[in-house]
Amino acid sequence: MEHFYKKPDKSNWKGRNSDSQEYLHEKVILKDLSEEFQLPSGQPAYALLGYACDEGVRRNSGRPGAVEGPDAIRKELGKLSNHLQKEVLLVDTGNILCPKGDLEGSQEMLAKKTATLVNSGGIPILLGG
């Protein structure tokens, strides 16, 4: 799994600071999916998972760049105001990668990790370019 996965990076979450989690970068929790993964029972959670892959674009003679999408989205999300209720978790679980053009393998890993998020009680939000 390790070559298909990159753990979340705190440097993607920056913005203004406040005293009471007024911005999303202050609320987000980073969880590594290569470790045992479980969300707190009964606590609502949005789980972000990136799909950083240009291979589909390459195969269709398109313009690469989608691989940068998930982290670019995170960098902009972090600056936004936090309107989530206090008990709602926002969890960044990293990115699924596409090593050596293995589109099929990366899509299988994306499906597997999305199922992990759902089975742990999270609401997955997939980020792609």
Image: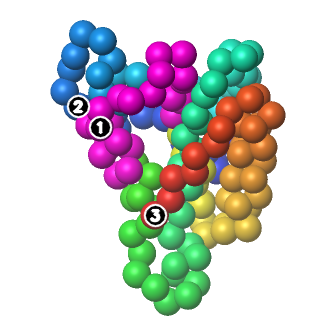
Q: Quadrant of residue 119?
A: top right
Residue stretch rendered in magenta on the structure: 72-92
Looking at the rendered structure, the kind of residue marked 2 is: Gly
Residue 47 shows which numbered tag? none
Q: Is residue 43 magenta?
A: no
Q: Residue at x 50, y 59 (%)?
A: 128
| Nearer-the-camera pick, 12 or 82 | 82
Looking at the image, which residue sits at the far bottom?
A: 61
Residue contact at pointers 1 and 2, CB within 8 angstroms? yes
Horizontal side of residue 40 vs 46, given as left or right: right
Q: Which residue is mark 1?
A: 80
What is the number of the mark on residue 15?
2
- Along the line of sight, which residue is nearer the eye, 75 or 98? 75
Mark 1 vs 2, N-terminal side: 2
Q: Amino acid at mark 1?
A: Leu
Is the residue 40 above or below the residue 12 in the image? Answer: above
26 on left or right of 55: left
Q: Which residue is mark 3?
A: 129
Residue ID at (39%, 58%): 68
Rendering coords of residue 103 (x, y %): 66, 68
Name above or below for residue 42 compared with residue 107: above
Answer whether residue 86 is magenta in the image.
yes
Q: Secondary structure at mark 1?
A: loop
Q: Quadrant of the N terminus?
A: top right
Q: Residue at x 56, y 55 (%)?
A: 51
Pair 1/2: label in front: 1
Q: What is the spatial separation of the Cα atoms under label 1 and label 2, in whole angstroms?
A: 8 Å
Q: Which mark is first along the chain, 1 or 3?
A: 1
Image location of residue 106, percent across then percent down: 68, 59
Q: Is residue 29 visible?
A: no
**Extreme residue in the left direction:** 16
